[in-house]
Image: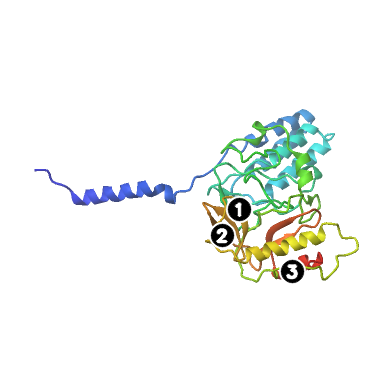
């Protein structure tokens, strides 16, 4: 007769359950060989005559890709790379490689998207450039404090995880961007970014249906009032206002009115983004996944300032109403 050791049986059963459930609790770590991100730049620097200045800047730069790095450490390092290139007769290869480096994805230990820097770069050569994400990232969530979920001056990252140098989508996990592309995409970045070296605006040349926004901890505040059935302009825009200013304000009012009726269970199409109960909502699997805004702010549709269209971003109710009122829309 066979005897069963029930203590061992239950122990093994429990272990098997933990193993089978592991994927639910374990998070994939997305990493890379960070030194490879600046190896080509360092060689170009040595060739240009940078000598002993090349390696320290290279090391500082590639360590900024570690998960512990601040949101702007990578951009600051790229600024240092460009500064040195400019001191070496504006070496174009060093500048090109610095432009690619600033778009290299950063390590993602929690498989979430890495937040973007919210400061303008020192050098104009880096204007409008921001890092790609790794393909294995969760494109419905960001890591950290949720305050840098859009590149500075950009109203949408489409497709998610892309960057100016790689417009077709994210970078394969662990791969260096400079092995995939040669063109940093500077022309397209400057055409579509509202950020300028030394300062920034909230605008970007996008069509009216722009939906991606910054995210953080949510607050509840009433959205700007919805338009009347036939919304007239009760206040004329400033004399020098652009031709699209009023229309942008009216579009923002209409979107906020539409968003006010949405809930987390409202039907949606995958990829659709909107404000839902004051939070940023992205449609995943036919329903909105919600992420709140930073303290004291909530999600609003706002009129663009320098081009036709609207953006969705986190702001205070007073600021949102002021921006809409400034367009002359009622």
Of all residues shown, which one is farthest toward the right? 239
| Dot placed on the residue nearer the N-terminal end, 3 or 1 | 1
How many labels sit on residues?
A: 3
- Residue, far front: 230
Q: Residues within 10 Å of mark 3 (few under 14, many from 20)?
A: some
Instruction: Spot the residue most to the top.
Output: 47
Distance between mark 3 and mark 1 Cα atoms: 24 Å
- The local crowd at label 1, few if under 14, some if 14 to 19, many if 20 or more residues have their Cα within 10 Å, is some
Q: Nearer the viewer, residue 76 or 173?
A: 173
- The disc, 1 or 2, on the residue closer to the chain's N-terminal end is 1
Tell me where residue 185 sits by quadrant: top right
- The residue sitting at 22% across, 48% down in the picture is 9
Looking at the picture, does residue 324 appear above or below residue 20?
below
Find residue 16 and report its horizontal and vertical position in percent. 31, 47
Which label was assigned to residue 321?
Answer: 3
Circles 1 and 2, Cβ within 8 Å, touching? The answer is no
Q: Is residue 297 left or right of residue 81?
A: left
Q: Residue 8, how many percent across, how many down?
A: 22, 48
Q: Residue 32 appears at what percent x and percent y?
A: 57, 38
Q: Secondary structure at mark 3?
A: helix
Q: Secondary structure at mark 1?
A: loop
**Dot 2 corresponds to which residue?**
290
Residue at horizontal 77 percent and vertical 49 percent from the top: 205
10 Å neighbourhood of mark 2: few (<14), some, or many (≥20)?
many
Mark 3 or 2, nearer chain start = 2
The quadrant of the picture occupied by the C terminus is bottom right
The disc at residue 272 is: 1
User: Can the viewer see residue 298 in this picture?
Assistant: no
Of the residues tagged 1 and 2, which is closer to the observer?
A: 1
């Amino acid at each position: 007769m066979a005897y069963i050791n029930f203590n061992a049986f239950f122990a093994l059963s429990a272990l098997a359950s933990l193993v089978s459930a592991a994927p639910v609790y374990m998070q994939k770590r997305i990493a890379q060989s960070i030194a490879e991100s600046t190896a080509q730049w360092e060689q170009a620097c040595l060739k240009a005559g940078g000598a002993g200045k090349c390696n320290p800047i290279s090391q500082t730069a590639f360590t900024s890709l570690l998960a512990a790095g601040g949101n702007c450490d990578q951009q600051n390092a790229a600024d240092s790379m460009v500064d040195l290139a400019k001191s070496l007769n504006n070496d174009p290869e060093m500048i090109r490689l610095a432009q690619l480096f600033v778009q290299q994805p950063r390590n993602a230990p929690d498989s979430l998207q890495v937040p973007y820097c919210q400061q303008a770069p020192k050098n104009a050569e880096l204007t409008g450039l921001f890092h790609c994400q790794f393909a294995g990232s969760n494109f419905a969530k960001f890591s950290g404090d949720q305050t840098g979920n859009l590149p500075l001056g950009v109203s949408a990252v489409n497709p998610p995880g892309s960057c100016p140098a790689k417009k077709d989508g994210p970078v394969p996990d662990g791969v260096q961007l400079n092995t995939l592309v040669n063109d940093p995409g500077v022309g397209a970045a400057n055409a579509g970014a509202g950020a300028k070296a030394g300062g920034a605006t909230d605008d970007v040349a996008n069509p009216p249906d722009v939906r991606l926004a910054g995210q953080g901890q949510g607050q509840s505040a009433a959205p700007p009032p919805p338009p009347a059935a036939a919304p007239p302009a009760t206040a004329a825009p400033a004399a020098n206002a652009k031709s699209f200013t009023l229309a942008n304000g009216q579009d923002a009012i209409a979107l906020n009115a539409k968003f006010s009726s949405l809930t987390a269970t409202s039907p949606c199409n995958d990829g659709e983004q909107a404000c839902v109960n004051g939070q940023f909502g992205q449609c995943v699997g036919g329903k909105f996944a919600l992420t709140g805004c930073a303290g004291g702010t909530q999600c609003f549709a706002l009129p663009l300032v320098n081009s036709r269209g609207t953006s969705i971003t986190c702001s205070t109710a007073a600021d949102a109403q002021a921006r809409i009122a400034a367009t002359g829309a009622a």
